Image (tube, rainbow, N blue to C red):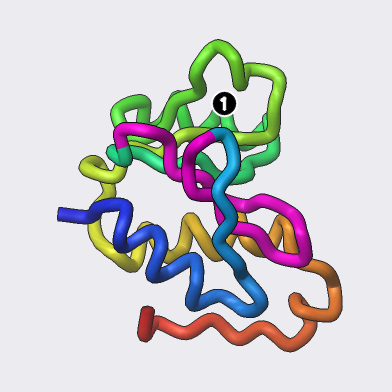
């Protein structure tokens, strides 16, 4: 089963990612911008997601994706780890979120790896 240690391992495998505790939970950042958090119970993670895409994700897979009321106006979506197909799906989600936060200089040279 996919868990928060998988989130941590994959996130930290992405270029220039650092882990920083904020709001009493682990957050992962690239160039100072947060791209994933792991909330208290560690059964989910929150990732960057444009609001227009977020509604489509939630409508298509409501057991996998959701937004708590206090994040309704943000560009974040929660992902239930137990609902993910496999580590490749988690990696794809984390890479997509990382790309939204990473500076252009990193994006230009980034080549995804399936090793994490």
Q: Is residue 25 highlighted in magenta?
A: yes
Q: Residue at x 44, y 26 (%)?
A: 66
Residue 90 in magenta stretch: no
In the displayed structure image, the side of residue 75 where residue 68 appears, left or right: left
Stretch in magenta: 24-41
Q: Quadrant of residue 96?
A: bottom right
Q: Classify residue 81 by image quadrant.
A: top left
Residue 98 placement, left or right of 11: right
Q: x, y (%) of residue 112?
A: 54, 81
* Image quadrant containing the N terminus: bottom left
Looking at the image, which is closer to me, 21 or 55? 21
Residue furthest toward the left?
Answer: 1
Residue 63 pos. (x, y %): 29, 28
Q: Which residue occupies 38% across, 58% down?
A: 7
| Left or right of residue 66, residue 103 in this image | right
Q: Which of the 4 image quadrants contains residue 90?
A: bottom left
Q: Is residue 97 left or right of residue 4?
A: right
Residue tagged 1: 55
Residue 116 image position (x, y, % from top left): 37, 79
Q: Residue furthest top?
A: 69
- The kind of secondary structure element at disc 1 is helix
Tell which of 19 and 91 is nearer to you: 19
In the rendered view, would you say 78 is above or below 86? Answer: above
């Amino acid at each position: 089963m996919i868990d928060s240690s998988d989130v941590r391992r994959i996130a930290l495998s992405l270029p220039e990612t650092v882990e920083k505790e904020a709001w009493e939970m682990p957050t992962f950042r690239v160039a100072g911008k947060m791209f994933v958090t792991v909330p208290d119970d560690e059964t989910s993670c929150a990732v960057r997601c444009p609001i227009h895409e977020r509604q489509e994700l939630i409508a298509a897979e409501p057991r996998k994706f959701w937004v708590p009321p206090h994040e309704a106006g943000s560009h974040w979506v929660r992902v239930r780890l137990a609902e993910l197909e496999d580590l490749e799906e988690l990696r794809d989600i984390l890479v997509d979120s990382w790309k939204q936060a990473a500076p252009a200089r990193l994006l230009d040279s980034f080549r995804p790896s399936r090793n994490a």
